[in-house]
Amino acid sequence: MMDYFYASGIRRARRLALGALAVAFACSGALAEENPRDPYEAFNRPMFAVNEAIDKYAAKPVAQAYDNVVPLPVKASVGNFFGNAGDLWVGVNSALQGKFGDAGVDLGRLLINSTVGIFGLFDVASELGLERHDEDFGQTLAVWGVDGGGYLYWPIIGPRNVRDTVGFAVGTYADPVMYVRPVSVRNSMAGLRFVDVRASLLPSDKVVEEAALDKYAYIRDAYLQRRRNQIFDGRPPRLDD
């Protein structure tokens, strides 16, 4: 079933991407505005438009089908499994940021959920009080003092900045799913994870649509605020006026 969902989404995305890209670039000149937080807006808005088309006609319908067909306990287990697969990289980044206590918790989560939790299908560690952390290499670079480098919007992977784009690329190489063989199984797992994540975002779609006069700007500002909170563990310093 997931092979069907994944293949269907990929076929739709391929058909839409080129056409949407051409239309979006034709409109980009009228939409772009100078913004010091968004120096690449003339690039970003066309990419956002491409992503909107891919999401509307491919990713979202597949995610909705998955959400409607797959039972809630199965979806919870899928999310737990991929979360567990990512805990090792989270722990590495915790350690690289000097958060050695958090890194120990991340490793403990991995060990408990991979064994007692049956390969991560059940989040036993959270039930035992071991909190799941949210660290990635983009945050690590920020802690090391690397500047964000300007906001970017990429089709499929969504909002990033230059620093987080590099962090995403490094994280991709560290992703254990990318080393699963045969390749068909790897692709099915990657597709399942993408669909599961998109399905988890379905409830927020209506909120964004209703709240945003400019959906692009709304998502940009939300991303920048969220990343700032993540980098400073929810305690960002006050910005100068």
Image: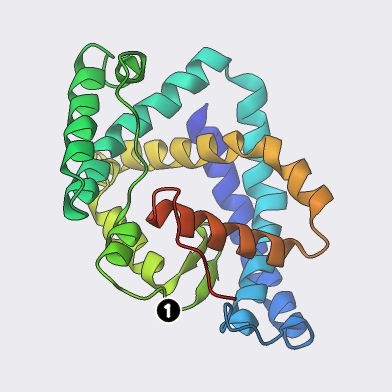
Q: Which residue is mark 1?
A: 149
Residue 12 position (above or below residue 36): above
Q: Residue at x 33, y 48 (%)?
A: 135
Q: Is residue 92 left or right of residue 233?
A: left
Q: How many marks?
A: 1
Dot 1 falls on a residue whose secondary structure is loop
Residue 105 pos. (x, y %): 22, 31
Amino acid type shown at disc 1: Gly
98 and 223: which is toward the camera: 98
Q: Is residue 4 left or right of residue 186?
A: right
Residue 153 pos. (x, y %): 55, 68
Residue 173 position (above or below residue 24): above
Colouring mode (rainbow / by chain / secondary structure / one colour): rainbow
Q: Residue at x 28, y 65 (%)?
A: 141
Q: Is residue 185 left or right of residue 222?
A: left
42 and 96: which is toward the camera: 96
Residue 146 pos. (x, y %): 31, 73
Residue 222 position (above or below residue 178): below
Q: Is residue 38 left or right of residue 77?
A: right
Q: Quadrant of residue 193?
A: top left
Q: Residue at x 48, y 65 (%)?
A: 160
Q: Look at the image and tell me in which quarter the C terminus lies.
A: bottom right
Residue 27 pos. (x, y %): 77, 81
43 and 212: which is toward the camera: 212
Q: Residue at x 36, y 14 (%)?
A: 127
Residue 192 position (above or below residue 27): above
Label 1: few (<14), some or many (≥20) within 10 Å? some
